[in-house]
Image (spheres, rainbow, N blue to C red):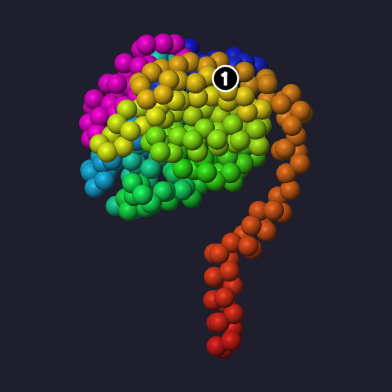
Amino acid sequence: MVHTLPGVAGMKLALISARPTIADKTKNIQTMENYIKKTKADIYVFGEYFLSGDRCKDEFRDLAEPLDGPSIQHLKKIAKTKQCYIVFGMPCKDSTIDGLLYNAAVLIHPNGTVDAYKKWFLPTSGPFEEKIFFDEGEELPVFTTALGKIGLLICYDLNFPEIAKALTLQGADLLICISASPTTTQKYFETLLPARALENTVFIAYVNLAGNQEDLVYWGGSQVYDPLGNLLEKAPYLKESIITCDVNLKLLEPARARRPVLRDIRPEIYQDLYVLSRYHTKQKVAEEKKFKST
């Protein structure tokens, strides 16, 4: 059952490394429900694209739904019945502009509230083609739950430390990164995860798909790190599994006293990064050309 009493600082996570069926939302929802029935937890986390399956390409347009669509309505009933939170990935339709899609991480609350984070960084190289199908997210929300504050990331976002930093500076206690990482990128994620936890003194849970989706094999290996970058739990590689992990948010305060990176951050560095970026340089050159021509 979800902890709702004042002062509760713990939560039980259930991390599901599983293989969704491509383009079969009904079957994938049933898979989610079956896993949720297997064990008691406060938050059940599934991987990126779990509702639709990965490698869908043009089918993403037909599979995408708004955040009040039929799949969400079904999963809301499960969350209410189980009195739990559910996190998973799906292709999401824009709420105002027809034809725009996002790669979204959805958080369903037991009271029926639905939150979503839309992926900022869309890999488009090698086997990845996300910019062909999806628009980039522009918001970095942190979601308040009865358990604590949660920030969501999706897969490639983990390569950009500014995302995790922005969520932590908004008060996130736990970052959940859902992923569809093939075996070729495993070493990168297992390097970045403890680094993101330590450099922000925040809990990080990572949930990856397992098994294959057409031409790619996903390595599973879902895992949780504490605020000092210590591994708490890890799922098996390359096979479907469900693991649980108890997270004690009371460990945040002593970790931040021991490693005061949030105290010592110098926000001016982000302004410097903007000035140094190629985007700013292009804008500056364009403004200079415009000035000379007037």
Residue type of the residue flagged with mark 1: Leu
Let me know if residue 134 appears in the view.
no
Q: Is residue 165 visible?
A: yes
* Above or below for 244 versus 287: above
In this picture, which residue range is highlighted in magenta? Answer: 18-42
- Please name the residue shown 45% across and 34% down the image: 186
Q: Say above or below: 183 vs 244.
A: below
Residue furthest out toward the bottom: 294
- Front residue of 22/8: it is 22
User: Which of these two is toward me, 152 or 122?
Assistant: 122
Say which residue appears at 69% left-offset and 53% top-offset: 269
From what the image shows, is residue 56 above or below residue 245?
Answer: below
Q: Quadrant of the C terminus?
A: bottom right
Which of 286 and 64 lies nearest the eye of the viewer?
A: 286
Residue at 38% x, 43% y is 103
74 horizontally vs 168: left or right = left
Asked if the magenta segment contains residue 161, the reply would be no
Residue 114 in the image: x percent, y percent?
42, 32
| Residue at mark 1 | 232
Mark 1 lies on a secondary structure that is strand
Q: Which x, y percent locates residue 290?
A: 55, 82
Residue ID at (66%, 37%): 199
Measured as percent of width and height from the top left, residue 24 is found at: 22, 31
Q: Is residue 25 magenta?
A: yes
The correct choice, above or below, for 70 with respect to 250 in the image is: below
Provide residue 42's location: percent of width, then percent of height.
48, 17
Q: Is residue 227 left or right of residue 60?
A: right
